[in-house]
Every structure is written in C-alpha cells, then in structure tokens.
Amino acid sequence: MDASALLSRLACPLIPVVVIDRLDDAVPLAEALLQGGISALEITLRTPVACEAISAMKSALPDAVIGAGTVSSGEAYGAAVQAGADFVVSPGATDQLFKTAAAHAVPFLPGAVTGSEVLRAMEFGYAALKFFPAEAAGGPQALQALSGPFPDINFMPTGGVTPHNVAAYLQLNNVCAVGGSWLTPRDLLIDQQWEAVFQLAADSVTQVTQMSRGEWQ
Ligand code: 3PG
C-alpha cells in the first residue's frame, strides 16, 4: 500500500506528531489517543526510545497505524521498518531516502514544499507528500497554489498546525491529513495525564467531524 492509500483509509485525518521520552508512556499514550478517535500516530525518531516505543505500541495495539517521523537517513528508515512502523515520514527527501524507501514495502511520505521538490518526488513515483514546515512555508495559501500545477498530489501539512488553523488546511482538496504536536502537549506527557490526552483527542476529533458536516465555526 502506498502512503496515499494508507492516509485515505484513515477514519480520522488528524495525526499526532509525538515526541516520546519514556518508553513506559508509549502504550498508555497510544491507547488514550486511539480511544479519543485518532486513527494514526507519527512517532518522531528524536529520542533514544522512539523505535522501541513504536515496537511497544505495535505489539500492544496491532491494529493501530503507527508511523515513524523525522526519518532523516536511510539508516533511520531501516530502523523504523525494523521497529514495525506502518509508514515513514521525513521532513524532506534525499537520494538516500528515496533509494531506501524503494527497497522497503513500508509507505513513505517525503517532505516537499517547493515546486522543484514536488517534481522530484513525483519523478520517484510519489503522490502523497509531507508539507513541512506548513505555516512558515505559506500555509493553506501555498497549498492552494500548489494544487494548480500539481492536481494529483496530496499533502499532509505539519509544522504550526493548531486547533485554530486546522480547518483551513482540511478544507483544501489536496490535503489528505494534517499532523501536529498540539494533540500531545509535553506537559501532559510529562505528568502522564492520559485522561486529558484522551479528552483533547476526543474534542479535536469532534471538531473535525463537525467540520465535515459543515458545522465548523
Ligand atoms: C514536527 O515535525 O515537529 C511537526 O511538524 C510538528 O510541528 P508542530 O510542533 O508545529 O505541530
């Protein structure tokens, strides 16, 4: 399955971008998010326990869609696959990443912002791309502009997406999902406030559901 197909089958288009410091937090955190209605998580490879956290989540919650983020090298890509990641996300793309991705069945979402970066990803056969850093790179206006020359490309914007601007992204036809760290605030994770994580996820999912019903304010 490629990344476009994987993202389009998600019931919820909100993807928490997670920085996990303690391995013991992995499963309760994933459980809270999934119970709140989240369909997929991106675990950033920014901490020493990130790959172990992915493995622990996949082992405890085999049906959960758990991706690896901040994958910046072929070596990291291999480690993410080894850990059991269902998809791999990178803030950009390099020859090494494209080459490694081609050697694995796990879907890859390369990062692209400019026309040249989008064209390069298309040359490698990609139709679903991460748009990072979304707000700094022009936000919904930039994505709308990209839909002209690239009508068949879907984006997952991350970087500066918040409850206040998420609607503007999800209303775009070329946005298939949005990612962000607002769903897993650091203070809640430090204090292991899983009920609060659940509630935040549930409220955000409700917000998005209302939006798709045209009730968004
Ligand atoms: C990231 O890779 O850090 C993501 O894009 C999340 O960005 P955010 O913290 O602005 O949501």
Image (tube, rainbow, N blue to C red):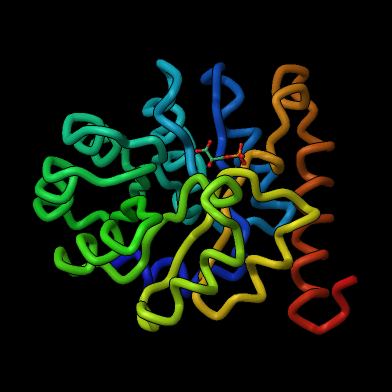
Camera-side residue: 58 or 73? 73
Q: Residue 194: horizontal and vertical position, in percent? A: 76, 33
- Location of ligand 1 given as a quarter of the image: top right
Left or right: where 45 falls relative to 178: left
Q: Quadrant of residue 164?
A: bottom right
Q: Quadrant of residue 4?
A: bottom left
Q: Is residue 1 visible?
A: no
Query: In the rendered view, would you say 180 is above or below 112?
Result: above
Residue ID at (22%, 68%): 122
Left or right: where 9 falls relative to 159: left
Q: Residue 26: horizontal and vertical position, in percent? A: 56, 30
Q: Residue 73: horizontal and vertical position, in percent? A: 22, 33
Residue ID at (71%, 18%): 190
User: Quick one: quadrant of the N terminus?
Assistant: bottom left
Query: In the rendered view, would you say 11 is above or below 59?
Result: below
Q: Is residue 113 visible?
A: yes
Left or right: where 131 falls relative to 169: left
User: Quick one: quadrant of the C terminus?
Assistant: bottom right
Q: How many marks?
A: 0
Residue ID at (12%, 40%): 96
Residue ID at (29%, 67%): 2
Query: In the rendered view, would you say 74 is above or below 99?
Result: above
Query: In the rendered view, would you say 196 is above or below 114?
Result: above
Camera-side residue: 26 or 2? 2
Q: Quadrant of residue 45?
A: top left
Camera-side residue: 59 or 202? 202
